Amino acid sequence: MTTNPVVLQILTDLGMPEHEALRQLENNSLILNLYRGDVTDDIVIAIAENYTGATIISLSGCSNITNAAVIAIAENCVGLTSICLNSCNNITNAAIIAIAENCAGLTTIYLYRCRNITDAAIIAIAENCLELTKIYCAYCKDITDTAIIDIAENCLGLNKIDLLGCRKVTDVGIIAIANNCEGLREICVIYCDITDTAIIALADRCKYLETFECAEDYGLDLIPLRDNPKVTATGRRLVEDIINRPKPPPLEEGWWLDDGTGPQCKGMMN
């Protein structure tokens, strides 16, 4: 292993034990959740400029950072595959668009409670990061069906999407996911504006679906569905059937391909 003395010094100065800092460097990761109160733009920018091989970055809860830090990551860590920006309340669309335009290999993005994020950021991810498999947008209150349809039509390998609290997402967006993302395994639509129609579409099209009502972090069972007057007892029973029914063998990794004309499933290309 080749150590990165500059980044190692920054991490240990933050209070990270040396063995943990070395482990992260060895794994091309940067997990700063435990140091959130001390993480600033200057620190993240310095790390990004000296740690261009980072592929997994988590700044969850680092509420002091702004677009400047995320843009530095985007411009320096172009091999990024996963980024967590949960509760980074100061970031806006500009930061996410920079990630989308520079990090085409992104597969996972967490944007929980990033309240300044709108459709423009999600559309940029959808149109540039075609290998996306997981997107978490809980409480991104301004996201609408327009962005979700773009995700559905461009990111056919999507297997997890969290839309908790996205009240502007309706049946239209969820049906687009159902119609395009065959390998979907987890979806959260708590407090989305859905009806039985969306649930039926997911049941019919997403045979691999295991977790319907929420991502694994919440465990809210079906209570929020009971709070939605547009979902009837029939819809709630169907959710239980989806979760409990036998699942087919998992799809092979990379079951969809992009031949340069846009993403298609392998079956459509043969």
Image (cartoon, rainbow, N blue to C red):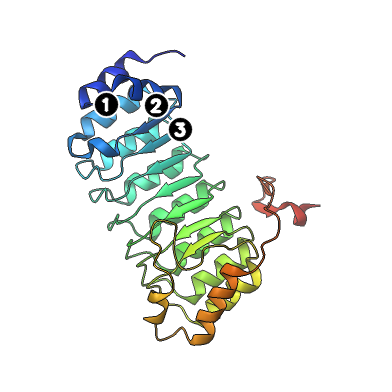
Q: Nearer the viewer, residue 153 or 137?
A: 137
Disc 3 versus disc 1: distance between alpha carbons? 19 Å
Q: Position of residue 157 (x, y in %)?
A: 60, 52
Q: Residue at x 43, y 85 (%)?
A: 230
Residue 16 marker: 1
Kind of residue indicated by mark 2: Gln
Q: Residues within 10 Å of mark 3 (few under 14, many from 20)?
A: many
Residue 157 marker: none
Mark 3, residue position: 55
Element under disc 3: loop
Q: Position of residue 221 (x, y in %)?
A: 43, 70
Element under disc 1: loop
Mark 2, residue position: 24
Q: Residue at x 28, y 31 (%)?
A: 44
Count the labels in the image.
3
Q: Which numbered disc, 3 or 1, marks the residue closer to the eye?
A: 1
User: In the rendered view, would you say 230 is above or below 199?
Assistant: below
Q: Nearer the viewer, residue 178 or 144?
A: 178
Element under disc 2: helix
Q: Residues within 10 Å of mark 2 (few under 14, many from 20)?
A: some
Q: Residue at x 45, y 41 (%)?
A: 82
